Amino acid sequence: MSKLKSGSNLEKVLKAGHFAFTGECGPPKGANVKYLKEKFQYLKGNVDAVNITDNQTAVVRMSSLAASRLMIDEGLEPNFQMVCRDRNRIAIMSDILGAHALGIRNMLCLSGDHQTFGNHPEAKNVHDIDSMQLISLVKMMRDEGKFLNGDDIDVAPKLFIGAACNPFADPYEYRVYRLANKIEAGADFIQTQCIFNMDKFRDFMKKVVDMGLDKKCYILAGVTPMKNAGMANFMSKNVPGMDIPDSLIKRLKGVKKKDQADEGIKFALEQIEEFKEMKGIAGVHLMAIEWEHKVPEIAKRAKVLPRPAV
Amino acid sequence: MIVADQKSLKEILEMVQNHNKILIIGCNGCVTVCNSGGLREVEILSSSIKLARKKQGSDIEIDIKVLERQCDLEYIEEISDVVNDYDAVISMACGVGPQFLSEMYKNQTFYPGLNTTFFGGATQHGVWEERCAGCGTCAIHVFDGLCPIARCAKSLMNGPCGGSSNGVCEVNKESECIWDSIVRKKMEAGKLEDLIGVKGFKDWRTARDGGVRRSVREELVKGTI
Ligand code: SF4
Ligand code: SF4
């Protein structure tokens, strides 16, 4: 086995050829550590690593860096998310060093939801660099031990580099090339946007495999269980780049209101079963948005437990 | 050109509420072209203020004037004889106008009558759109003539982001996703290879981030041409 890039649990799980299972956790709108720790308990032992979101949807929350460290203290592995919206290259490099120093070993590089979606739409944004450049920056810092200006770093940050991919955004024909660019830039693993349109995703993955991208990078398929038909409807209408087929909305509407959550989970489980067999897919990224307490049940029913010890 | 919108009458009335004799100065440059600060707009604003003040029972005296350009010392000198005859002056130029005026006439108060918005042009009658953010290092040829710095809501050098949908930007359904257009243009022209690889880090020193900017043409300063 060649040398590990970061030594993170996620990297080891993937490298050993296991089907990875990652989760997601949003920090609180406050400094409520107790609440955060409660959420962690639902994830502990059920996933290989947990994405800690960075002020997702541009709503102010506890910093992802701090929450990631709190997660380590509780014995879980964070996947530290960082967006380019709120930091310039100086703050970005500084936080990357800080992340490594705090024991963080996975990092997901994102552009970030625009601040007009959030609760401080009056804010100025930064976008000094974009997510593609962020990936290459983390790689440069890790592999060359250099800052962007070429200066040497005293103890380089060793991070397993993640990136996002949304096959459902436009222009569709270009999305696979954009993914290729992210891999070329240095992404070690990819977590896709929530997948609902399986036909389109199958087609996308065929292109990915044809281009051999799955051989250069681990691709984790994004799964979000729908809580009810209303949520599916809302996401379909209001979340840009989200592709929710009418058939799914119909399926959820087709059962009694109290059974819709379970129907949503069933759909997610069917997806996970398919992903286990799908060529080019190395794992699943479960985004149970504000539904962390359902993760133990979903993991169990998805038959991905126990998580491998590597 | 520089595009600007008129401030609301309410805001302007508040600015001049304690003044009884004012001058409104328009500009024959960009703001005339974008119908916000030319002669017509100056006349309309003058009548609107007079009418509103009449209703309030506090008449106001207003003179109007339109300068060739308010971003040129030569033209703003034209009001030197009269400028201090007024309680205050409203400039209907882009943000440069009231500043040049304030710098030249230190004892007078100049109010901006416009909100200066962007560098752009009219895409149809009555609609103006942003095209340039004045980043100081133009590279639009790399993007087939479409600027992602000014026209992508996140100024992405490597777009489009995951929110691009049906050619529309995630931030605003009224704006095209410029990255959608860049990518389609490249792909249709068979230039996909231009989009392969990472576009490098931008040097923002030439933009506003490098501090206040200045352009010096030595030959003009020295008077050699
Ligand atoms: S690249 Fe810079 S100078 Fe050129 S159009 Fe865009 S913002 Fe303006
Ligand atoms: S949707 Fe297009 S224009 Fe809008 S932020 Fe994303 S890439 Fe930029």
Image (cartoon, grey):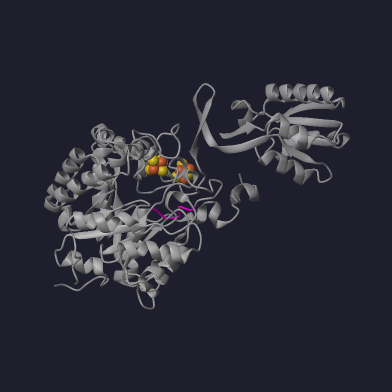
**Which residue is found at the position 25% from the left and 64% from the top?**
A48
Image location of residue A261, percent across then percent down: 29, 44
Q: Which residues are magenta?
A: A126-130
Which residue is drawn at the image coordinates 72% and 40% (left, top)?
Answer: B98
* Magenta stretch prevailing secondary structure: loop
The structure residue drawn at horizontal position 30% and vertical position 35%, both measured from the top left corner, is: B184
Find ligand 2 in the image and state its quadrant: top left
Residue A151 appears in which quarter of the rendering? bottom left
Which is nearer the eye, B184 or A62? Answer: A62
A222 with respect to B19 (left or right): left
Q: Tell me the quadrant of the picture where the N terminus of chain B can be found.
A: top right
**Within the image, what quadrant is residue B109 found in?**
top right
* Residue beneath the point at 37% across and 68% down: A71
- Please determine whether, in this image, residue A300 is positioned above or below residue B184: below
Q: Is residue A184 visible?
A: no
Evaluate whether residue B41 shows in this view: yes
- In the shown orientation, is residue A51 left or right of residue A305? right
From this view, report whether residue A38 is shown above or below residue A112.
below
Residue A193 or B108: which is nearer the viewer? A193
Q: Position of residue B200 (x, y in %)?
A: 36, 55
What is the total number of numbered labels drawn onto the structure image?
0
**Whole-percent x, y for residue B34 in the image:** 59, 27
Residue nearest the viewer, comparing A266 with B177? A266
| Relative height, residue A252 to residue A99 (above, below) | above
Spot occupied by residue A2 in the image (x, y as percentages of width and height): 16, 72
Q: Is residue A210 left or right of residue A150?
A: left
Q: Is residue B116 magenta?
A: no
**Quadrant where the C terminus of chain B lies?**
top right
Outermost residue toward the bottom in this view: A154
